[in-house]
Amino acid sequence: MTINDEREKSEERKFAMDEQSQFNARMRRDRFIGHWAAEKLGLFGAEATAYAKSMVNLDLEQHTDAAILARIKSDLAAKNVAVSDADISAMMEQKMAEAVAQLKAGQK
């Protein structure tokens, strides 16, 4: 194996690890934003957990932040909870930062 082959394999491993890290952070973010929205909807305990899991499942199916935002906006509007798209997007960014920080810290 040449140095270039080793370098290429190393870059492929790094890419795969980065992709896995991004996926893990996104799924954690979805769970966090789901719990945030659940609280605004008046859901607690098992109901809140189920709602948060539904956000993870939605992302796994749709693969877009827009789908998460639209679902939360729709659910909140159905309960007459006024939250802007900008507020939801900002919270999604905040929850992503929390997820990344937790993963970097090795938290489960």
Image (spheres, rainbow, N blue to C red):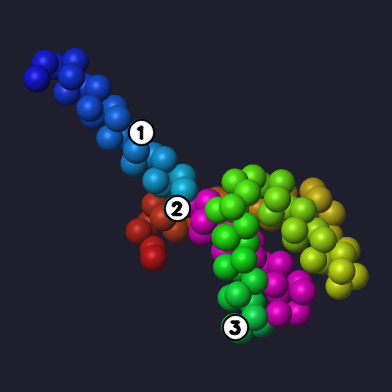
> Does residue 40 show up magenta in the picture?
yes
- Is there any visible trace of residue 94 in the rendered image? no
Q: Secondary structure at mark 3?
A: helix
In terms of depth relative to the viewer, which is nearer, 103 or 18? 18
- Is there any visible trace of residue 78 in the rendered image? yes
Kindly indicate the quadrant of the structure image that contains residue 74: bottom right
At a point 77% along the width and 53% down the height, the residue shown is: 70
Name above or below for residue 40 compared with residue 32.
below
The residue labelled by disc 2 is 24
The residue labelled by disc 3 is 46
Kindly identify the amino acid type of the residue bearing the numbered disc 3: Ala
At a point 55% along the width and 53% down the height, the residue shown is: 60
| Magenta-highlighted residues | 25-43
The residue labelled by disc 1 is 15
> Does residue 28 show up magenta in the picture?
yes
The answer to whether mark 3 and mark 1 are in CB contact below 8 A is: no
Question: If you read the primary sequence from the N terminus, does the residue marked by circle 3 or circle 1 appear first?
Answer: 1
Q: CA distance from mark 3 to mark 1?
A: 36 Å
Q: Is residue 55 left or right of residue 66?
A: left
Question: If you read the primary sequence from the N terminus, does the residue marked by circle 2 or circle 1 appear first?
Answer: 1
Kindly identify the amino acid type of the residue bearing the numbered disc 2: Asn
Q: Which image quarter holds the C terminus?
A: bottom left
Q: CA distance from mark 3 to mark 2?
A: 22 Å
Taking the view exactly as shown, the residue that stands out farthest to the left is: 1
* Residue 30 % position (x, y): 59, 58
Q: Is residue 71 left or right of residue 102?
A: right
Q: Is residue 43 left or right of residue 27?
A: right
Q: Main secondary structure of the magenta part?
A: helix
